[in-house]
Image (tube, grey):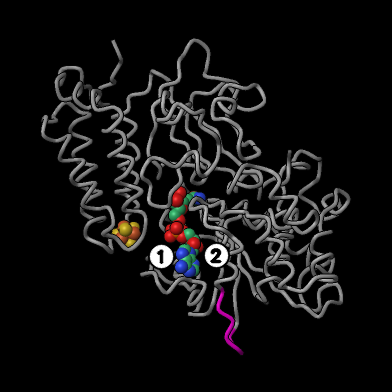
Amino acid sequence: MKILTEHIDVQGINTFDVFRKNGGYKAAEKALKTMTPDEVTEEVKKSGIRGRGGAGFPMGMKWSFLAKPEGIPRYLVCNADESEPGTFKDHYLMMKSPHTLIEGMIVSSYALGANTSYIYVRGELMYVVHILEKAIQEAYDKGFLGKNILGSGYDLDLFVQPGGGAYICGEETALLESLEGKRGNPRNKPPFPAVKGLWQCPTVVNNVESISATSWIINNGGDEYAKIGIGRSTGTKLISASGHVRKPGVYEIPLGITVEDFIYSDEWCGGIRDGHKLKAVVAGGSSVPILPAELILKTANGEKRLMTYESLSDGGFITGTMLGSGGFVVMDETTCIVHNTLTFGRFYHHESCGQCSPCREGTGWMDKILYRIEHGQGRQEDIDLLVDVAKKIEGNTICPLGEAASWPVAAAIRHFRDEFEWHVKHPEKATQKGAVFMRE
Ligand code: NAI
Ligand code: SF4
């Protein structure tokens, strides 16, 4: 079942004409010519689609929160700042099929009553900015953007903005600050962007994948979309699979397949690389807790774990899901979990914007402690000290980066404490690159 990637390998799908020949822009035509904005919103609500950026917040509900005061403009901003380590699905979609996103932007902007919309693209991906700009120009030339689109009376201008080059610019309020030309510092919430967003006006911020899915929903109906998947995890999801699998890549899966199938089936990852065994998985990008093999394949109750928001949810993550952004990082038994935790920890320390003391200082402390454990200078009490620092960051910061930095450290210690202890007990094994834990 492919919704977003059905035609992704068709030669020339990045051009307007080929995209159109393959059924593109039908949803934009249908929405603008035959539906009211409220009817479009209703279909998105019926679909049950949840935000694909990582938080899994119901998209239709977010749209219904949008304030609509008289005479004040509203905006749709697409978050294409995809920077979560292990996540590269939006990048793939925009690069291969930019019109999929542009059509979704037209449908979604129409539903929200936005006449100016933005796609904020990760700053490092300038070639994607150029691909989108070229495709947007084609859409203007063919009458799908600009004034009085298809004679419907609806106007829409669409702009692409290169990002500020920092991970934190993907946090929705930091993104809005950056889009306004300022340093990308997150804002306190509430007010949520739906009430005060870009230029203090009501704004919806949605991920690339979420917006792209709206065209299929309009063509086929929200009820049809809701039939795919299981329970509250409806539709398909793009998963970026990386690490020690035989076939890394971007896969569009129907939500609800088992994690075991996703890892071992030839349709998806094709199993662990030859001669090796599964050790651990980070299922939703580096912000979610790591799970050891036995817990990623089965829940604590012994049930097969599914690729859904609910099934991947018992790690204590505040937004309630380890499916996160779909950055599925697979590790075999050659992976040293302390080294892996240090790599992620160093990343968060570097990317903290520094506004809140617990995150600014805490990520630095965790980085230093992890570094000394990895390099043979750790003390036994450092392991509990790490957990303590992680706990003190949790819930005490403006944005979720603090938690994203602290939960994975706490989870790594919870599930792989023996590896941390081994590092402390064997300083002689440390090299300049650190020590590599190998199970005896
Ligand atoms: P969140 O749960 O705070 O918010 C989710 C969305 O719902 C936001 O757009 C928020 O404005 C909206 N919302 C929530 N309550 C609302 C209310 N009462 N009224 C109006 N709107 C409301 O999560 P957040 O901060 O948006 O995202 C965190 C997630 O981002 C993490 O789970 C992580 O997996 C993911 N992430 C993804 C990255 C990527 O590259 N794709 C990078 C970093 C993190
Ligand atoms: Fe900045 Fe960290 Fe505070 Fe987020 S939690 S606002 S990244 S200091």
What amino acid type should be assigned to the residue bearing mark 2?
Answer: Val
Label 1 element class: loop
Indicate whether 64 appears above or below 170. below
Residue ID at (38%, 27%):
292
Indicate whether 200 appears above or below 384. below
Q: Between 177 and 252, which is closer to the camera in this rendering? A: 252
Q: Earlier in the sequence, mark 2 or mark 1?
A: 1
- Whether label 2 lies within 8 Å of ligand 1 gets the answer yes
Q: Which residue is mark 1?
A: 184
Label 2 element class: strand
> Left or right of 224: which side holds 308?
left
Residue ID at (65%, 21%):
266
- Chain part drawn in magenta: 66-72
Classify mark 2: residues with Cα within 10 Å, few (<14), some (14-19) or many (20+).
many
Q: Which residue is mark 2?
A: 205
> Left or right of 141: which side holds 263?
left
Indicate whether 266 appears above or below 25. above
Tag in front: 2 or 1: 2
Where does the image place residue 26, in percent across and percent down from the top left?
Answer: 84, 59
Indicate whether 217 appears above or below 370. below
Residue ID at (67%, 76%):
113
Q: Is residue 341 visible?
A: yes
